[in-house]
Image: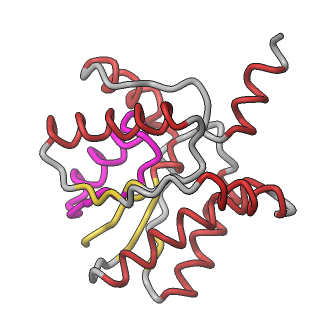
Amino acid sequence: MRILAHICCAPCFTYPHKRLEEEGHEVTGFFYNPNIHPYQEYKSRKGGLEKYAELRTVKVIYKDEYDIESYLRGALDAQDRCRFCYALRLTETAKTARSLGFDAFTTTLLISPYQKHEMLSEAGRKIADDYGVEFYYEDFREGYGESREIARGLELYMQKYCGCIFSEKERYYKNS
């Protein structure tokens, strides 16, 4: 199966990439993350992925659009900012998967114990129905620790929050 994998960052891609290839899938990455703030964080994550892609010889499509203003307007207007963010990124992944003839799409967000997993899988299934391309669901959380070990071994940039300004505030504000 040809799978387009939305990638939030290189560390979160390491284990799903390995696992999907072991299962016999042909994996192409897709970097689209207008939610990441500040811009230097965005550049660090993109740079980490570029390094990983070169080291592991994996193809990655970069939709390199840093449209933080549109993301913030949408997130602030949404009833649930995480649901909005998941839908934004997965919709773009599904549209790209369909237009390039992939069999399915998935996301590295499925590895994180910090993401809203049920909401994420629900969004993926709905978007799959809307765009006519399969959402490949796999609970990658069991590989979270291994992903961190791989990332450290490859000296990849590792962030300390999900990427959005809201999670950055939640991480640092409560500790001040």
Q: Is 71 situated above or below 39?
A: below
Q: Give the left or right position of residue 95, taking residue 14 as reference.
A: right
Residue 5 % position (x, y): 37, 59
Q: Quadrant of the C terminus?
A: top right
Determine which quarter of the picture holds residue 94. Answer: bottom left
Q: Residue at x 33, y 57 (%)?
A: 62
Q: Give the left or right position of residue 60, taking residue 79 as reference.
A: left
Q: Residue at x 51, y 26 (%)?
A: 159
User: In the rendered view, how is the structure colored?
Assistant: secondary structure
Q: Quadrant of the N terminus?
A: bottom left
Q: Is 49 situated above or below 17?
A: above
Residue sitting nearer the eye, 17 or 64: 64
Q: Is 1 situated above or below 107?
A: below
- Residues in magenta, as a range: 7-30
Determine which quarter of the picture holds residue 172. Answer: top right
Residue sitting nearer the eye, 94 or 33: 33
Q: How many marks?
A: 0
Q: Give the left or right position of residue 143, taking residue 115 as reference.
A: left
Residue 161 % position (x, y): 61, 30
The residue furthest top is 176
Determine which quarter of the picture holds residue 95. Answer: bottom left
Q: Is residue 24 magenta?
A: yes
Q: Residue at x 77, y 55 (%)?
A: 81
Residue 85 % position (x, y): 65, 58
Q: Is residue 159 magenta?
A: no
